[in-house]
Image (tube, rainbow, N blue to C red):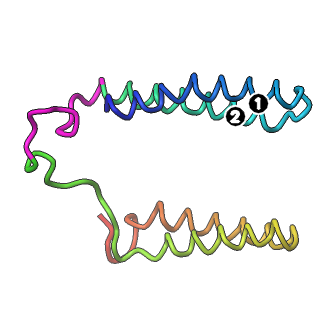
Amino acid sequence: MKVETGLFLWGVPFFLVVGVVYGYLTGWDEYVGFLGILLVGGLAAMIAFYLGFTGRRVGMRPEDRLDAEIHEGSGEQGHFSPWSWWPLALGLSAATGFLGLAAGFWILYISLGMVVIALVGWVFEYSRGDHAH
């Protein structure tokens, strides 16, 4: 994960410099802009730290080595549920929440209940039903 860590580490000084320049050019009157850019720099630092820490813990991946073969990256890449309908329910709940932000806050309260139901259903999907382990 050396490449990913390096990309985010290069973003940290870039965003810090751009944030300071932006603040100077706006006369430090527009707080959201320069503060947002500085926070993006902080977020890039946190992601770089996480990727570097994980890369040291996990070790070199085939993507990180110059002598790696294509077949070394094959195999299981994770666990996915192709039959699950809960991501769709969560997406519709999030869309309803954004509608609530635009149209009225009472819709947002309804969507929060929908989000809770969808998250609980997705998390406990393998604890009950046909595909329980």
- Image quadrant containing the N terminus: top left
Q: Is 36 located above or below residue 111 in the figure? A: above
Q: Which residue in the structure is indicated by mark 2?
A: 37
Disc 2 marks a residue whose amino acid type is: Ile
Q: Is residue 76 magenta?
A: no
Left or right of 14 on screen, residue 112: right
Q: Residue furthest front?
A: 25
Residue 35 percent location from the top left of the image: 77, 31
Q: Are marks 2 and 1 in contact (CB under 8 Å)?
A: yes
Q: Is 77 left or right of 113, judged from the image as shown?
A: left
Secondary element type, mark 2:
helix
The image quadrant of residue 112 is: bottom right
Would you say residue 62 sits in the magenta stretch?
yes
- Residue 22 numbered tag: 1
Element under disc 1 = helix
> Mark 2 against mark 1, which lies toward the viewer?
1
The residue positioned 8% from the left and 33% from the top of the image is 67
- Please say if 45 is above or below 110: above
Magenta stretch, residue numbers: 56-69
Q: Amino acid at mark 1?
A: Tyr
Instruction: State the separation of the CA atoms marked 2 and 1.
Output: 9 Å
Residue 130 image-quadrant placement: bottom left
Q: Quadrant of residue 28?
A: top right
* Residue 64 image offset from top left, x and y in percent: 22, 33
State the residue in front, 7 or 119. Answer: 7
Q: Residues within 10 Å of mark 2 (few under 14, many from 20)?
A: many
Q: Nearer the viewer, residue 90 or 48?
A: 48
Above or below, 28 relative to 130 = above
Dot placed on the residue nearer the N-terminal end, 2 or 1? 1
Q: Residues within 10 Å of mark 1 (few under 14, many from 20)?
A: some
Quarter of the image that includes the C terminus: bottom left
Residue at 47% across / 31% down in the picture? 8
